[in-house]
Image: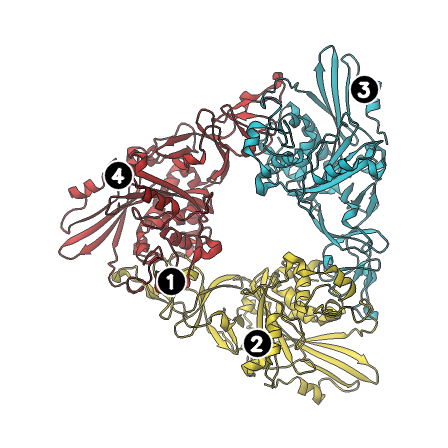
Chain colours: A yellow, B cyan, C red
Amino acid sequence: MLSATDNETITRTGPGTHVGELFRRFWLPALLPSELPHTDSDPLRIRLLGEDLVAFRDTDGHVGVIQNNCPHRGASLFFGRNEEAGIRCVYHGWKFDVSGQCVDMPNEPAESDFRSKVRATAYPTREWAGVVWVYMGPPGLEGDLPRFEWTGVPPENRYIGKYVVDANWLQVIEGSIDTAHTAFLHRGPSTLEHKTAPRPMTDFSRDIPPHFSATETEYGVQVIARRDLPDHKTYWRITQVFLPSYSMIPADPNGNASLVATVPIDDVTCYSWKWTWHPRQAWTDEQVADMAGGSRRRIGGITYPELVPGTLRTAANAANDYRINRDWQRTLNFTGIAGQSEQDLAVQESMGPICNRTVEHLGSTDLGIIATRRRVLKAARDLQTGVEPPAARGGELYHLRSAAVTIDSQASLEDDPSVLAAMTAQA
Amino acid sequence: MLSATDNETITRTGPGTHVGELFRRFWLPALLPSELPHTDSDPLRIRLLGEDLVAFRDTDGHVGVIQNNCPHRGASLFFGRNEEAGIRCVYHGWKFDVSGQCVDMPNEPAESDFRSKVRATAYPTREWAGVVWVYMGPPGLEGDLPRFEWTGVPPENRYIGKYVVDANWLQVIEGSIDTAHTAFLHRGPSTLEHKTAPRPMTDFSRDIPPHFSATETEYGVQVIARRDLPDHKTYWRITQVFLPSYSMIPADPNGNASLVATVPIDDVTCYSWKWTWHPRQAWTDEQVADMAGGSRRRIGGITYPELVPGTLRTAANAANDYRINRDWQRTLNFTGIAGQSEQDLAVQESMGPICNRTVEHLGSTDLGIIATRRRVLKAARDLQTGVEPPAARGGELYHLRSAAVTIDSQASLEDDPSVLAAMTAQA
Amino acid sequence: MLSATDNETITRTGPGTHVGELFRRFWLPALLPSELPHTDSDPLRIRLLGEDLVAFRDTDGHVGVIQNNCPHRGASLFFGRNEEAGIRCVYHGWKFDVSGQCVDMPNEPAESDFRSKVRATAYPTREWAGVVWVYMGPPGLEGDLPRFEWTGVPPENRYIGKYVVDANWLQVIEGSIDTAHTAFLHRGPSTLEHKTAPRPMTDFSRDIPPHFSATETEYGVQVIARRDLPDHKTYWRITQVFLPSYSMIPADPNGNASLVATVPIDDVTCYSWKWTWHPRQAWTDEQVADMAGGSRRRIGGITYPELVPGTLRTAANAANDYRINRDWQRTLNFTGIAGQSEQDLAVQESMGPICNRTVEHLGSTDLGIIATRRRVLKAARDLQTGVEPPAARGGELYHLRSAAVTIDSQASLEDDPSVLAAMTAQA
C-alpha cells in the first residue's frame, strides 16, 4: 500500500516529475534498429516519458531522436524529409541534424539567417547490442550503457521483442518482479492445445509457498526466495530489479536466460521490452519463429505475445477481453486465456491505467515489489537533493545473472561458491 | 429551473454525493436473473452509481456483487474463476465469497495467511420477482423490497426489460413523469407502418391541456392531472413518482399496467427499467415477442425499444440520429422516428449528458417534475442531517396503482370510492 | 513567439472571451445556401464560436440560426419539425421563428400560455453573394456585409467551398498569410501525375527570398513583400489580412482571384472557407468540376481539397497521415502529399489542436503573421475598453484587391499608378 502522494510520485514520469527525472538519468531502450531499417528511411513518431518525438536514421546511419514539433512554427517533423544528413521540415524547409542543430534555413534571406541560434530538443542515441538506446537527461551526466549479459552475446544468440501495454509502467514491471503469481495466473497449459488440465486447477497443496526477502543494492533490489526442501536442503531463487525498470529471473534448465523492462511511453502506456538469450548457443530457426510468432512456448521462463501484424500492439487486448474462453477456464487452465504474456496483460491492464495503490492489501509474496517501490522512491528523492543515482553509471553493475540453486540448509548463501558462480554473467 | 448548485446536487450519484447517498438507502433493480443464467456462470462487469463492480452467481445460486478490483493488488475480478462458492482472482488465487469475505489466500504461506482480515466491498443482493436487487448503503439500514403490484403477479403475467440510456438519470425519469409530452412527441403512428398520418400533425385543437397538481407523499410524489369534460364530468389522472426513481402511469383500457425506473450507471449513463404486467392475465406469446423484439406496439402505455442483439444498447441511438426519417416526419408522425421508446431516447439524450437546468423555462405541465426534484433534494438534504428517508422502508408503501377515472365534477377526489378502488393494487 | 497569456487570448473564441467577442462584431460566413436547399428543408446542426446551434430555412425562405437546446427543457431542436414559418420542438411542440421568438406553446393551457416571454437565442442571418452570413454579436451593432470583389461578380464567375480543419482558427489563417511556405510545402507537382520532379527538390538557390514589411490598417493588415530584380526593377506583392480572419493573395496571371477565411467552429476546429472568382469571366464546366472534385489544379493560386462525399471532411486527414507517400516525397514533390490544400492541412493540423506559440522561433518571413497577431490582439483589447472595431462596419472597406506588380526600383509604391490600379476591386 502506498500513500496517494507516493503513488502519484512513483507513477508520473513526464518532464519535471521526480521519477521522470530519475528515468532521464539512464540510457533507455527506445527502438529496435529494424524500426529505422536503412539510412534516410521514413521518420517514425514515438513518445517516451510523455514527450512526443520523431526518430530518424540519417544519411550516415546515425539515429536522431528529436522533438516532434519544428522549432520554427510547430509543424510536425514526422512529415519531414529525411535527407542529406538531417530531417527537413516540409513547411519552410528548416533542417536539423541528429544533434538537433538547425543546419539550413532556406526561407530566410542570407543576411537574417539565424540557423546557428536554433536548436531542436534532441536526445543522444546509441545503437548497441540490437537496441537503439536514448538518453533524455542533462547533457554530460550520461553513464555507460548497461552491460547486461545479453549485450555481450552474438546477435544470433539473443532475441529481442517490444510491444505496447496500456497501463502505467510500474504495474507492468511489478508483474515481473512478483514471480509468485506464476503458480496461479500461468497455471495449466498456456497454448490451449491440450484437451484437459493436467491436475485439478485449484489444488494448490503441492505448491510450497516461498519465503521472500529483499535487499537494496546499488543497481536496485535483490530479491531472494527461499523454499525449504526435504533432506536439509534449501532451494534459493535470487532475482534482480535493476534501476530504473528492469527485472531478471533465473535461466531455465536449458540455460536460456531472460530479462524484461518497461519503459514509459506516457503515464498510462508503456513499452514492454523482453530479451531472451543463451550465453553460448544460437537460437534455432524454429525458436526464433516461435518467439516472433507469439507461439506462447516458454523460453527462458518468458513468452512473446502475438502482435497485430505491422504494429507493436498485441492481438489479444482489452477490447477483446484478451480472447478469454470461459470453457477453457473451467477445464484447461487458470485463466482461459492463451499465452503467458497475454495472461500478464489481462491482469496488469485490468488494474486501470494507473493502479490505485492506496487500497491494496500486500502480503509476504509482495516483498520484492515493496522493496522496489521504496528503492525507486528513494533514488528519486535522492536525486531531488542532488544525489545522482549510482546505478546510472551502468556498465559492469548490470553484468549479473539471476540464480536458482539448491544447497545445504546449513550453508551460507553469501559464501556458497555455487551461488557466486550462478550469479556471474557468462558473456 | 434549478440553480447550478441544485442541478449539480441532484444529478451526481457517485460515492459520497448527497443524492448518491440517497440512492444507496434503497434496494435498486440491478440485473435480470438471465444475465447470470446458472450457478458458476460467467462473471459480469457492471457499473452502478459510478462504482465498478463484478456480479457473479455462485455455486449455491447466490448472486454476489463485488468490487471490480481485487483487494490484493487490483487485478479485475471479472477475469476471475467463479467456482466452489466464490470468485477467485486469477492473479494470485485469492478467493472471495458473495459477502466479500476473503476465503482463500493460496499464495501466502500458512503462517502469514491473513485472509480473515481481507474483505472486498460487496453489496447484499436479493433475487425476487424476476429482478436481482442490490443494496449499496450502510449495513443494517436495508428496508423491505418495494411491493409493487407487479412483484405479486405470476411470472407469466409480467414482462421486464432493461436498456442503457446515454444521459443522466434525472432527465430520463423526468420524461416519464411528464406525460404531457405524449400528445406531441408520440403523436401519430409509432410503427411507421401506416401510409399517412391520421390527422393534421399540428392541429392541437382537439387536445384538452390538463391542469396539474402535485403533492409530496411518504413514497415520493403524487401527480394529479385534471381535465374538465362536458356534462359536469371531470377526468382525473393520478400518477406516482416513487423514490428514488420510479414513475407509474395508469393501466391501459385492457388492464395492462406499467412502471418505469432509471438507475444511474454513472452520472452520464443510466439503465432504463420497464415493467409491464396484468394483475390477472398471462401474456400471450405474441405479446412477449412484441415486447422482446421491440415491435413498438404500446402495451400498458409503454413500449420496449429494439436492442442490438446480445447487448443492452438500443439499435436506434445518437450515432444514427435514432434513425430519423424526415419524410416520415413531414407526412406520418411527429418525429419521423419509429417507436415511443426511441422517440423518448432522442429527446432525452439530446439534452446533453447532464441537462443544464439553469436555463429552462418550465410551464404548468412541468409541475410533476418540479415537485419531484424538490422531493428528491429534500430527501437528500434530510439524509445529510441524519433523517433517513421513510420511503426506504419499502414494502407496502409501494403497493399502489395509478388511476384514470371520470367522476362528477362535484365529487371529491379524496373520498370517491371509485378512485380509491382504482388506486388499490390488485396483486 | 507569444506569451502563454497572449496565445490563450488569441486562440479562444467562445462566449465571453476577448477574441470571441471580437469575432462576434463581424458578419461571419456560416453556411452555403445549398446546405439548406429549400424552404422547410431539414434542420442542420452547426457549431460556431463554440456555440451549438441549429440552422433551418423557414417556409418563407429565411434562414434561422438558433440555439440547439429548446428553451423549455433542453431537447435538441435538430429533431424539430421545420414547418409553417418556424421550428417546432418535438418534445412538447413549442415553436420558434427565425428571430428566436416562441410563437406556439401548445402544451400549455390558454390561460397560462407564456410564449411571449420565451425567446431562444437566435442570430440574424443574411443570404448574400452565395453565402449565408450570421451575426452573433450584440443587437444593433451589425455593420454592413463585407463588399469583397467576389460578392459583386455574377454567380457563375465565382466558386465557393468550405471544409472542416481540425485545428485552432489562428494557425489555419496563419498558413494563408505566410506565403513564404509556398516555395517549400507546395514545391513540385501537386497532382502526383508527373513521374519525376522538375528540378532537384532541395535546390533552393534560384529562389529569391522576399523582404517583408507589414502595416496596420483599418481593415486589418497590409503585408508587402519586396523582391529586388535585375535591371533596377522591383517586384512587389501586396496582400491583405482582413479582420477578423480573411487573407487575400494576388490574382494569378489569368486574372483568377481568391480569398480564404477561417471561422472557428470551436477552439480546436474551424471551417476553412475559400472563394475563387474572375471579375469578368464565368467558370467553365471543367473548372467547376476541378474545384468541386478536388482535382488539385491551382486556380487563383489555391486549390480545393477532395472531400468525403456528403460531408465537409477532407478525404486526406490525420487518420491516414494525409495519404503521404514517402516514395513520392523522395522523387516527386516536397511532401509526398497530393494537393496544395492537403499539404496545408498536414502541417497546420500537425501543430496540435492549439499551437504552442511560446516556443516558436519566428523569422523575417513571419512578419505578416506577427503583424496580424498584434492587430487581432489590439482590436480585442480595444473592444474590452469600449472601442468598437472600425473594420466591423464592413462594406467598402473590404472592396480591395491584392496586387503583384513590377515597377522601377526608384518609383514610390504608394504613388505608382499601376499599383493603385492593381489594388482596385474590379467588380
Q: Which label sits on residue A390? A: 2
| Residue drawn 78% across the image and 47% down it | B34
Dot 2 amino acid type: Pro
In the rendered image of this protein, does residue A409 appear above or below residue B174?
below
Judging depth in this view, the residue of C356 and A130 nearest the camera is A130
Residue B317 placement, left or right of B241: left
Disc 1 secondary structure class: helix
Q: How far apart are marks 2 and 3 (CA)?
A: 86 Å
Chain letter, disc 4 residue: C
Q: Estimate how packed mark 3 is, as few (under 14), some (14 to 19) or many (20 or more) residues with alpha carbons within 10 Å.
A: few
Q: Quadrant of the C terminus of chain A?
A: bottom right
Q: Where is residue B202 in the image (x, y as percent from the top left)?
A: 58, 22
Residue A242, visible in the rendered structure: no
Dot 4 amino acid type: Gln
| Mark positioned earlier in the residue sequence (4 or 1) | 4
Q: Which label sits on residue C329? A: 1
Q: How far apart are marks 1 and 2 (CA)?
A: 46 Å
Q: Estimate how packed mark 4 is, as few (under 14), some (14 to 19) or many (20 or more) residues with alpha carbons within 10 Å.
A: some
Q: How far apart are marks 1 and 3 (CA)?
A: 84 Å
Residue linked to disc 3: B414
Chain letter, disc 1 residue: C
Q: Are marks 4 and 1 on the same chain?
A: yes
Dot 1 amino acid type: Gln
Residue linked to disc 4: C281
Q: Distance between the residues labelled 4 and 3?
A: 82 Å
Tag nearer the camera, 1 or 2: 1
Residue A31, visible in the rendered structure: yes
